[in-house]
Image (cartoon, coloured by chain):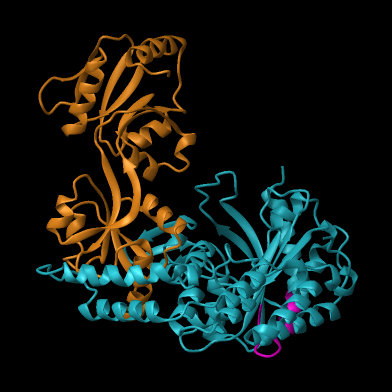
Chain colours: A cyan, B orange
Amino acid sequence: MISKADIRAEAARLLARFEQAGATAVEADILQPADVLLDLYGEDIRGRAYVTSDAWRGEQMLRPDFTVPVVQMHMQHGADPARYAYAGEVFRRQEDAPERAHEYIQVGYEVFERDNAAASDAEVFALFADLLAPLKLRAATGDIGILKAAITGLKTTDRRKAALLRHIWRPRRFRSLLKRYSTQGTAQRELMLERTVNNAAAMEGTPHVGLRSVAEVALRYDSLREDAATDPISDTEMALLDDILALRETAPHVLSNLRDIAVDMPAISPAVSALAARLDAMDALGVDVENLAFETSYGRSSMEYYDGFVFGFYAPTRPDLPPVGSGGRYDALTKVLGQGSEIPAVGGVIRPAQVLELGGLTGTGDHYAAGKGGLSQ
Amino acid sequence: MTIKLGVPSKGRLMEKTFDWFGERGVSLRRTGSEREYAAAVEGVDGLELVLLSASEIPRELAAGRIHMGVTGSDLVRDKLALWQEQVTEMALLGFGHADLIIAVPKCWADVETLDDLDAVAASFRAEHGFRLRIATKYHHLVREYLRANGVADYQLVDSQGATEGTVKNLTAEAVADITSTGETLRANHLKILSGAVVHKSQATLFKSRRAQWSDSDRGNFRVLAEKLGLSG
């Protein structure tokens, strides 16, 4: 049995390593205003975070992660660029998996930097890879930016693109939207419009109730009409999207596949170049890029605020455990929390309890280069 | 020791439960004055009747303070996490039927399904600056249902009664509530989303997985289960 004191000591060692890497150690309140988290993550967060309240400050949540308070702190009075590290408890309701930890320590490292996203991404990944190298973990990586670029580049209406982008992190609804916008979905789109027309005709004498105005209903009617009259997303583009989403190989293979796809879908070229630049930057920091796993769909279901590079480190012998470390890029989050200002940001967290469970990090302390080859596939 | 059976303390649910047991040779009845929550059992040995609010029965079952209980299947699913690990369903009693549904104003000609609701939630938030409000008392069930179906940009607001009135009062845009005939919904100018039944509820006899059973309880339970025509 690993004691809490051991976990704290491991967390302190990891925090010290992050500080050595150039981060300033910061603290965050355990009680966080619920409205900020709810606006960001939606109602689903209530199923994952503990909610409490008092009559003065209203609803509060026990910190489900550090990202939001650290971003807020940075947006208010941070240096530019800045690197932060922290260590402390986070709290998660686990109603559907009571065996998982409800309260555990996270140690995190976050980089806020405007120029050279590739270098910042690589810095965070290489730092984590190096620190965790003794545990012989399997690294998973992905890039939400590729899918975003592919959607933005579709030859279809802005409304459809916005709807698809909104549901990138809900794969099931994303899939059903995509189907509706395809040739297969033409009948459904026509049906949605027809129903609206029929309902409107049968509404004689129905009073208007509620806050949503007649004008809003009319606008939606216009959008349904537009959608029914618009050509479906072509079979060619649908096939390209499927190809992109199915990519799961070593990073150099995926890169080469994406370059082929970019010939038919030039809109993804900038995102593909960004991936290439990141892999170069990772290679320069000693990461074994040749054998690095890459999945275009990685991080779509569990990490809603990540919108670029994503990564996780898993114990191959313990598939029952959540990732030992994980993180990614969250530029859009800083925009939402920044109220007008924004700054590109990337970071990640390590769970010291899991590090100890897998045997601890004794014998580490070398620099990045020593971590080369530490990532077994 | 006795086996404790929790039954709703008033109303049709109580009467129908008494009838269901009565038809199977187990007589349950209230005793004392009309206001006193006391009860008697005849026809089997070692069974004690505990009168409780239907909404507290799931919690009492989960805590093992009662061995069996009758309540709506909706309440067990809403109030207990991983309910199958805490209670077992012994019998569906065939009354107290009600569907937990989502309803929106009838004047929303453009909304018929969850797909529509999700699209409307996105534009509503953009227009009004806050997430579309759904009034309910079934927070857990409704949230899980909407999450599983990938609906975003909504919020649940608590409503413990007169839920259908919240839309007219501008405290919610939609409701998620139990309905059997849909009468109250229609009277309040609401319509049910098609294909979006969150849960089909009925009165159900549950057995606690946590309660302590003595040897005599087990013996008495076998006799009771046989009488009720249940495998146990």
- Residue visible at 48% across and 67% down? A184
Q: Is residue B216 above or below residue A301?
A: above
The tally of labels here is: 0
Q: Position of residue B202 (x, y in %)?
A: 29, 36
Q: Is residue A251 left or right of residue B161?
A: right
Q: Is residue A377 left or right of residue B101?
A: right
Q: Is residue B216 visible?
A: yes
Q: Is residue B1 visible?
A: no
Q: Position of residue A73 (x, y in %)?
A: 54, 79
- Quadrant for the N terminus of chain B, please: top left
Residue B94 sits inside the magenta stretch: no
Q: Is residue A192 left or right of residue B209?
A: left
- Residue visible at 21% across and 56% down? B163
- Residue nearest the observer in this picture, B210 or B100: B100
Q: Position of residue A22 (x, y in %)?
A: 74, 79
When asked about the image quadrant of residue A168, the answer is: bottom right
When asked about the image quadrant of residue A241, the answer is: bottom right
Q: Position of residue A185 (x, y in %)?
A: 45, 68
Q: Is residue B205 above or below residue A141?
A: above
- Quadrant for the C terminus of chain B, please: top left
- Residue visible at 49% across and 74% down? A164
Residue A115 sits inside the magenta stretch: yes
Q: Is residue B166 left or right of residue B216?
A: left
The residue range painted magenta reads A111-124
